[in-house]
């Protein structure tokens, strides 16, 4: 049977456009001057590539603005000059920190796309805006219907730019060692270019090679080849030492007592990265500093029955970790909370990829998913391992196996083993699946306090043994206009992933969705879409948990403005054994970039929702709102205020189950692409907390970082009358400094 399916995948795949090869010339490094300008010596022997087609809103129509690329290489780097023509008065962008310019897509950007393995499976995107600010992304396909972007990928490369009377120029100097690629002196890579710009406030994408919109795999359609001869691989060893120190103080007696600081805590550690070859690496960290400098955006969780998931912000755990992304939460890096040592091996070639991760965690979080709620605790020392191997076949089909395990120092363990795969039947039909089995022995500990039971087991950690499973299969079809999906997922009551994130279990879901979208080139309408999604959820006793219908409408209009309306109706929902009917709510979402200075996002939610945390849950009337604004002052300074408000009121309006807001302001001044200063302040009305976080950051490359900053917190924990609470009166204070420097050998 697998052979038949694979044969179908090979038979139905179609390559619509012919390949083109560019033979690049080797030049002397001395002729390159990174100044954002074009000299005759730099382009004398260069191969010229043009960006000829409009992809959105046009469909392979002629590009409205011309874009020229001049390509050559040295013995160690690829050299690309981009000449982007256009109206300089309409150029959007700012000098930005690394990897932050794509937010809201209110920038003029050039994306260079590389497919070093010519496998139409994963590509590397190196981007720059008109101000030389960098962003790098790895794109993968065949995980679902569309390309999936992994922003954790980091490459060290140089950019320089200038704005002139007919557009702007960007120079890229890209070391070959920055992009994983096959070994050998002669290289043939897939290559294309995407450019984004605005005309009269409307966003436009142009491309160097035609795209077939009926093929959701964009990375499968890179038809240009660049031929690079006589370049030898140089094995690199990188040392990443760091030094950090912090001092924490607090008022321990009352709001009037002085802040008492403890002893300054200093740490020193070392990271080592060794290149096995041009695509495989070994990493080791000794006493790593995995503290988060960037503050998580606080989520409103006052009415949440389940644990909340936050993005990974630690570079070590975000770099090269895409192989450990699973739909059912089998791996979640933030469960490795405070490691003392960790190692990571990444192996890649044209036909397979593998990763091995190990860590000793000093403070292990413990999450138990339940049918109607999550249980969270804080554990002790544990030993963590994760492994994944993936075999890759032609035309996007692949199969893999994986395992994660956690052994607790005081006894107990959690292990999962899984198989997954994706079968590309043709360019529009795909089948994806995961099969996971877990084997657990609970530690004997007081980390989770609860008298609840499930499947004749106690939630409390008392050494019980159990196993469970999580499975899913996903069948999808996507063309330019139509998207269809059938998705079945099951998580048993005894399923746990001790190195993952599984906030709920004992569920069987069936999801069916169908949608239509249309791209247009009208002044007042750029694209629109409509979709319907139905969900049926039961537990493993086949008792009804929910019956849900979701309607989604979206319109993109002038000013790069997208308006989205969603109506979600639960015809039936069972929570804690209580049946609720016809619980529906509407959500309006607006994202807009009406000018080069201003971008905003707002959403409004109104309708009915459950009050989950009441002694007896009941339906209430929900009113929620979010408004976030980014305003740019010149090329270097911006401000980001936002406010989130949420209220749940009894249907008879006799009282509020809860009501409050979270206000946040971020201010950043970017001196240049490496050096910035920012301040974040946030007030949480729900628990009456306030913090200010100033930070000076120097980040010339992805690994070299210097931080100096602090956290000033006002926490209402002295049983003070609410009227006397002063958010500006700090009672917790922290100062920290960190210096991490990349040494290449």
Image: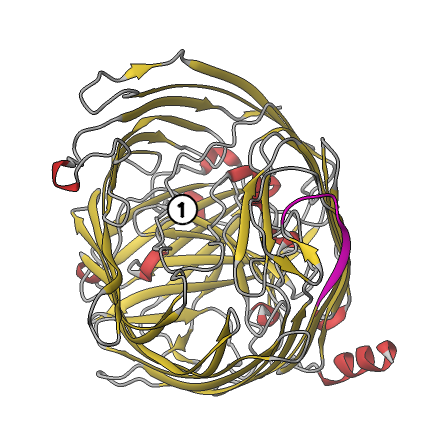
For label 1, the SS is strand
* Quadrant into which the C terminus falls: top right
Q: Nearer the viewer, residue 422 or 133?
A: 422
- View extreme (left): residue: 723
x, y percent for residue 206: 40, 70
Q: Nearer the viewer, residue 454 or 126?
A: 454
* Quadrant into which the N terminus falls: bottom right
x, y percent for residue 253: 27, 20
Residue 294 falls in image quadrant: top left
Q: Nearer the viewer, residue 570 or 266?
A: 570
Give neighbour class at mark 1: few <14, some 14-19, many 20+ (Cα, 10 Å): many
x, y percent for residue 354: 74, 50
The answer to whether residue 319 is visible is no
The answer to whether residue 537 is visible is yes
Residue 603 falls in image quadrant: bottom left
The image shows a total of numbered marks equal to: 1
Q: Is residue 51 above or below residue 553?
A: above
Q: Which residues are magenta?
A: 460-470
In magenta stretch: residue 463: yes
Q: Does residue 672 appear left or right of residue 145 in this picture?
A: left
**Image point 33% across, 78% down: which residue?**
585
In magenta stretch: residue 159: no
Q: Is residue 638 above or below residue 661?
A: above
Residue picked out by circle 1:
134
- View extreme (top): residue: 263
Q: Does residue 48 appear left or right of residue 471 in this picture?
A: left
């Amino acid at each position: 049977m697998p052979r038949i399916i694979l044969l179908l995948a090979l038979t139905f795949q179609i390559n619509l456009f012919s390949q083109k090869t560019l033979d690049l010339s080797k030049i002397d490094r001395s002729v390159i001057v990174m100044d954002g300008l074009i000299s005759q010596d730099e382009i004398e022997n260069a191969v010229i590539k043009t960006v000829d087609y409009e992809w959105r809103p046009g469909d392979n129509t002629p590009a409205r603005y011309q874009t020229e690329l001049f390509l050559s290489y040295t013995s160690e780097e690829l050299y690309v000059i981009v000449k982007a023509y256009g109206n300089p008065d309409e150029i959007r962008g700012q000098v930005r920190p690394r990897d932050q310019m794509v937010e809201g897509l209110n920038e003029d950007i050039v994306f260079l796309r590389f497919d070093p393995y010519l496998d139409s499976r994963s590509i590397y995107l190196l981007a720059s805006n008109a101000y030389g600010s960098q962003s790098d992304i790895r794109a993968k396909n065949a995980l679902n219907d569309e390309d999936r972007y992994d922003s954790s990928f980091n490459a060290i490369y140089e950019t320089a730019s200038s704005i002139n009377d007919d557009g702007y120029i960007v120079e890229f100097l890209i070391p070959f060692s920055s992009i994983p690629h096959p070994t050998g002196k002669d290289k043939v890579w897939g290559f294309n270019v995407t450019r984004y710009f605005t005309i009269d406030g409307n966003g436009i994408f142009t491309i160097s090679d035609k795209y077939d919109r009926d093929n959701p795999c964009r990375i499968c359609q890179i038809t240009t080849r660049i031929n690079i001869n006589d370049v030898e691989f140089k094995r690199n060893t990188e040392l990443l030492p760091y030094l950090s120190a912090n001092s924490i103080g607090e008022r321990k007696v009352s709001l009037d007592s002085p802040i008492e600081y403890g002893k300054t805590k200093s740490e020193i550690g070392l990271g080592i990265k060794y290149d096995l070859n041009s695509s495989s690496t070994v990493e080791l960290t000794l006493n790593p500093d995995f503290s988060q400098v960037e503050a998580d955006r606080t989520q409103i969780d006052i009415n949440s029955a389940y644990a909340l998931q936050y993005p990974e912000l630690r570079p070590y755990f975000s770099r090269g970790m895409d192989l450990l992304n699973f739909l059912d939460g089998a791996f979640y890096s933030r469960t490795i909370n405070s490691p003392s040592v960790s190692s990571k091996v990444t192996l890649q070639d044209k036909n397979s990829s593998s990763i091995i991760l190990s860590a000793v965690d000093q403070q292990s979080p413990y999450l138990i998913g339940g049918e109607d709620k999550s249980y969270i605790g804080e554990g002790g020392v544990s030993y963590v391992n994760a492994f994944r191997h993936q075999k890759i076949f032609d035309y996007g089909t692949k199969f893999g196996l994986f395992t994660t395990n956690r052994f607790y120092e005081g006894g107990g363990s959690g292990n999962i083993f899984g198989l997954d795969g994706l079968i590309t039947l043709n360019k529009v039909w795909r089948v994806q699946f995961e099969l996971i089995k877990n084997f657990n022995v609970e530690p004997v500990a007081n980390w989770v306090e609860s008298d609840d039971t499930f499947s004749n087991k106690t939630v409390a950690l008392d050494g019980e043994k159990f196993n469970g499973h999580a499975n899913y299969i996903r069948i999808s079809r996507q063309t330019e206009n139509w998207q269809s999906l059938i998705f079945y997922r099951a998580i048993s009551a005894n399923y746990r992933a001790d190195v993952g994130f599984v906030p709920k279990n004992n569920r069987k879901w069936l999801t069916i969705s169908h949608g239509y979208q249309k791209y247009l080139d009208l002044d007042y309408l750029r694209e629109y879409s409509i979709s319907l999604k139905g969900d049926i959820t039961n537990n493993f006793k086949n008792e009804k948990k929910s019956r849900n219908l979701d309607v989604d409408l979206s319109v993109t209009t002038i000013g790069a403005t997208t308006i989205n309306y969603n109506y979600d109706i639960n015809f039936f929902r069972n929570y804690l054994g209580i049946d609720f009917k016809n619980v529906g709510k509407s959500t309006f979402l607006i994202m807009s970039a009406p000018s080069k200075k201003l971008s905003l996002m707002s959403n409004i939610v109104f309708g009915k929702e459950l009050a989950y945390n009441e002694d007896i849950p009941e339906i209430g009337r929900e009113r929620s709102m979010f408004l976030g604004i980014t305003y740019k002052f010149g090329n270097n300074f911006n401000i980001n205020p936002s406010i989130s408000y949420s209220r749940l009121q009894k249907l008879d309006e006799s009282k509020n189950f809860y009501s409050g807001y979270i206000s946040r302001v971020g201010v950043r001044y970017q001196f240049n692409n490496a050096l910035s200063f920012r301040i974040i302040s946030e007030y949480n009305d729900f628990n009456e907390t306030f913090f200010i976080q100033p930070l000076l950051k120097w980040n010339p490359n992805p690994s070299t970082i210097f931080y100096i900053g602090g956290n000033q917190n006002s926490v209402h924990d002295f049983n003070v009358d609410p009227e006397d609470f002063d958010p500006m009166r700090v009672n917790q204070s922290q100062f920290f400094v960190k210096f991490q420097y990349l040494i290449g050998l």
